[in-house]
Image: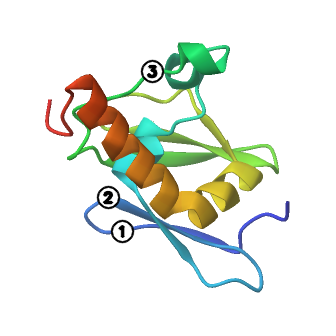
């Protein structure tokens, strides 16, 4: 996957805009990035270990740091910073944003969890 031409965090720190060459920008909410973090803390070491992360409605992006030429590390204002977001993963999140968001909301409901706590 080619590196994005641009990564831009919104003024309110709640949205990451990712622009890949020859593609319109993907708008990825900080909340989605946080709950879909590719970190072992969230994803576990196998699919059955994946954690549903509640209470992140108001999470914001503190900083983004490059990791080599293939990814970025995003630090959120809850101090989660262990996920490495590869270009491929950001591209996938952009394309699957609606489906992943719907699945996340359904998972919260199924587990009796909330975006607010």
Q: CA gap, disc 2 to disc 1? A: 5 Å
Left or right for 19, reference 28: right
Mark before the other along the chain sequence, 3 or 2: 2
Which quadrant is home to the C terminus?
Answer: top left
In this rendering, the answer to whether 49 lies above or below 115 is: above
Q: Residue at label 2? A: 13
Residue situated in front as seen by the camera: 50 or 29: 50
Q: Which residue is mark 3?
A: 51
Q: Residue furthest left?
A: 116
Q: Which residue is mark 1?
A: 10
- How far across and down, in percent of the image, does residue 42 sit? 50, 24
Task: Identify the secondary structure beneath mark 3.
Answer: loop
Label 1, secondary structure: give it: loop
* Residue placed most toward the observer, 46 or 67: 46
Q: Nearer the viewer, mark 3 or mark 2?
A: 3
Query: Looking at the image, is 44 positioned above or below residue 23?
Result: above
């Amino acid at each position: 996957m080619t590196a994005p031409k641009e990564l831009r965090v919104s003024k309110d720190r709640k949205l990451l805009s990712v622009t890949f060459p020859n593609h319109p920008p993907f708008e990825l909410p900080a909340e989605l990035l946080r709950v879909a973090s590719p970190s072992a803390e969230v994803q576990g070491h196998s699919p059955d270990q994946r954690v549903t992360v509640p209470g992140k409605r108001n999470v914001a992006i503190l900083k983004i740091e490059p990791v080599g030429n293939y990814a970025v590390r995003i630090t959120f204002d809850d101090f989660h910073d262990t996920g490495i977001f590869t270009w491929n993963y950001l591209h996938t999140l952009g394309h699957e944003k609606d489906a992943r968001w719907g699945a996340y909301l359904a998972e919260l409901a199924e587990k009796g969890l909330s975006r607010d706590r």
